[in-house]
Image (tube, grey):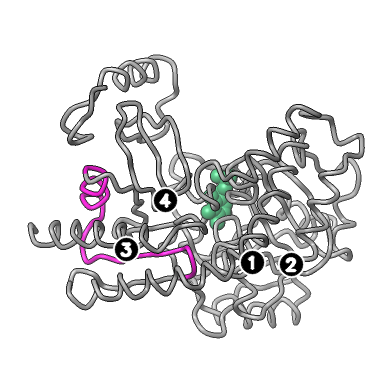
Amino acid sequence: MATTDSASSSIGEKTKGVIDTFSRFVVPNYRRFPVCLVRGEGSRIWDAEGNEYLDLFPGWGCNLLGHCPGPVVKAVQEQVARLIHVPNSWYIEPQGEWARLLSERSFGGQAFFCNSGTEANEAAIKLVRLRTNGERYKIITFQGGFHGRTMGSISATAQPKYQEGLGPLVAGFQYAPHGDLAAVEKLVDDKTGGILVEPVLGEGGVVPPPAGFLQGLRRIADDRDLLLIFDEVQCGCGRTGEWFAHQHFGVVPDVMTLAKSLCAGIAGGAMITTFEHAKHLRPGMHAATFGGNPIAAAAGIAAIRMIEDEGLLEHVARAADLFRQRLGGLRERCDAVRDVRVMGMMIGVELAFEGAAVVQACLDRKLLVNCTQGNVIRLLPAMTIAADEIEEGCDRLADVILDVAGRR
Ligand SMILES: *Cc1c(COP(=O)(O)O)cnc(C)c1O
């Protein structure tokens, strides 16, 4: 089998063929690495040329339990042979059971199921409007936040680079600086119906909330009768070592949106809200054809059970300590590392320079990482990652960062 020393210097024949097909038949809306991935297991993944990679960013945050986690694979295989899809005009067992498990692990209430994060946020936006029959339609969101790519969610996303050329945007979104409670108070008026925030900014650079911020938002929402919506599409479902990131801060939202890792790699999303508010999404006002389908539900249930059966929330706390220790050590040795932020398996290494060269050099060394906000190396490792994989990954990343920083 042909192997490549460097993904950037030579591309194997199989990979070339796949890339040719893409360039003719697939819309070019993604920047892709010239690598074709074919198989994964845990935190390892292999390409079409037989190269093995250590994956510290499995599935862009979707593969929370690593590649092809056994219990999820089994549950999906069993479900797909029994019932693949039926519309939401019928009852199915797994959707109800899935909703119960999520309710019991969050703040009670009910779930609306969909297929992605942006759809979950659209449901939350509709809920805000429906609660007051469209009278209080304004929603306050935060600079550096990310909520998805459909027109509602992109309008909620206060990052101009994603909105360029897409206007007119959906009306009613107002942006406040992240962490600025006074700015929020100022923006609230009699048309405001909600506040939407990521408890931990993901795409925005792995940024935890400043002290008192979520508590302050809760207070404002209570005082002004607003829905407090937490977008936990990236930070939820166990990634931070609690079931949901807001549980670290003792603040309970009225609405929470989930997707990415919700089904451990199968497409699935959900909006969770209290009984009191759920009733506003009355029959006919919202739907998702594939929402809560048997396969997504089976995967979602299996993911929750696997996290509990294997004690993975506790494992995340230990794994996070190891990352903190290793990457904190790097920060001490290297001035170009400005900050290391670890929220469980959500990790940002802020550099004093653009991170693209680091991502490329890591790829050359068979390590998969991501860069966001230009200079933050982002890791979203699997909850199942082993100590030796963390050490190997941090060593390789440290070598690359020291090397790239030294060449500047
Ligand atoms: C990825 C992401 C979304 C969008 O999810 P999609 O499934 O791509 O629609 C929304 N919010 C946050 C916080 C995300 O990280």
Q: Quadrant of the C terminus?
A: bottom left
Which numbered tag is attached to residue 183? Answer: none
Q: CA distance from mark 4 to mark 2?
A: 26 Å
Q: Relative to 68, is 399 on the left or the right?
A: left
What residue lies at 66% left-to-right and 81% top-to-bottom? 250
What residue is pinned by disc 4?
57
Three-letter code, disc 2 = Ser
Q: Is residue 191 visible?
A: no
Q: Earlier in the sequence, mark 4 or mark 2?
A: 4
For the N terminus, the image quarter is top left
Amino acid type, residue under disc 3 in the picture: Glu
Q: Vertically, is 39 above or below 350?
A: above
Query: Dot 2: within a 10 Å radius of its alpha carbon, few (fewer than 14), some, or many (20 or more) residues?
Result: some
Q: Report which residue position mark 1 lands on.
A: 244
Element assignment for label 1? loop
Q: Which residues are magenta?
A: 343-364
| Left or right, 265 with reference to 299 | left
The spot of residue 222 in percent (x, y) is: 75, 79
For image coordinates 44% across by 65% down, the residue present is: 206
Q: Is mark 2 within 8 Å of ligand 1?
A: no
Element class at badge 4: loop
Tags 1 and 2 in contact by the CB under 8 Å rule? yes
Q: Earlier in the sequence, mark 4 or mark 3?
A: 4
Q: For marks 1 and 2, give the CA distance.
A: 7 Å
Instruction: Using the numbered discs, state the Cα–Cα distance from disc 3 to disc 1 in whole angstroms.
Output: 26 Å
Task: Describe the element under mark 2 as helix, strand or loop.
Answer: loop
Q: Earlier in the sequence, mark 1 or mark 2?
A: 2
Q: Report if the beta carbon of the residue with label 4 is closer than 8 angstroms to ligand 1.
A: no
Label placed on residue 391? 3
Magenta run includes residue 180: no
Q: Which mark is residue 106?
A: 2
Residue 112 in the image: x percent, y percent? 79, 50
